[in-house]
Amino acid sequence: MKKYLYQDLYELEEKHWWHISKRKLVIEFINKFKPSINPKILDLGCGSGKNVEVLDKIGKAWGIDKSREAIMFCKKRGLKRIKLGEGENIPFKSQNFDVVTLLDVLEHVQEKPTLEEISRVLNKSGILIINVPAFNWLWSQWDEVLQHKRRYTRKMLEKALSENGFKIVKISYWLPYLSIPVILIRFVKSKIFKTNYPSDFKLSSPIINWFFQKISYIERQIVARYYIPFGTSLICVAVKK
């Protein structure tokens, strides 16, 4: 991710409906698939640290990120259990965590070494929760700003996980209603902003933010129980084989 976006992430991560909805969905999955008391959680690619801060309330959470800017913002939040590091070489001992979250990170990294390392640090009954952007035909300048390597289909993610020692227990697309707005907005922005493409997470209106929070609440109930066959993101829960 481009360095100038970390300040934006720090400011919006706790109030933008998309970040809030993703965190709440992750918490629902942790409570459903790993209902142990005080689970040890690792947020891999923790960004500015809001996820670590929230996950620490349902267990004991750590975060790692390869960006020094991200670590700086985590410390600004007052977070202590944060390390500078990469997914290909996680600086923790084997079978150390009950839950690993990989939220909009896998599309940035090499799949095999990252998933192998997650398998190593995850205990035998642990769970991995992944969120990734969906469908390469949704590729835009925003993906380039975020320095994505790929977007995923369900089959792509299932294949990557299966080949690296994981079995999926829950998977679904989500945010289907964003597809057309995303295409239109990103097309217009790409024509206007040739350099320093602004964040797609800028809050245009508190009313719009409130509206999407309400929609996403309904959607989370559906995703938690059923399967949505299409969307701009793909989320899954996996366990070690």
Image (cartoon, rainbow, N blue to C red):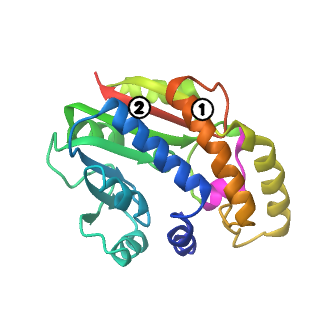
Asked if residue 179 lies left or right of residue 17, the reply is right
Q: Secondary structure beneath disc 1?
A: strand
Magenta stretch: helix, strand or loop mostly: helix
Asked if residue 24 lies left or right of residue 121, the reply is right
The residue lying toward the viewer, choosing from 51 and 210, is 210
Horizontal and vertical percent for residue 230? 67, 29
Identify the residue at horizontal 58%, vertical 29% (top origin).
222
Q: In the rendered structure, which disc, 2 or 1, sits on the residue that comes first in sequence?
A: 1
- Give the residue type that dot 1 points to: Tyr
The residue lying toward the viewer, choosing from 214 and 239, is 214
Disc 1 crowd rating (10 Å Cα; few below 14, some 14-19, many 20+) is many
Q: Can residue 173 be seen in this view?
A: yes
**Residue marked by disc 2:** 237
Q: What stretch is highlighted in magenta?
A: 137-145
Image quadrant of residue 201?
Answer: bottom right
- Give the residue type that dot 2 points to: Val
Q: Is residue 111 visible?
A: no
Image quadrant of residue 45?
Answer: bottom left
**Residue marked by disc 1:** 173
Horizontal and vertical percent for residue 184? 84, 51
Seen in the picture, residue 226 relative to 50 is either above or below; the reply is: above
Asked if residue 121 lies left or right of residue 8, the reply is left
The residue lying toward the viewer, choosing from 4 and 62, is 62
Disc 2 crowd rating (10 Å Cα; few below 14, some 14-19, many 20+) is many
Image quadrant of residue 185?
Answer: bottom right
Horizontal and vertical percent for residue 160? 44, 29
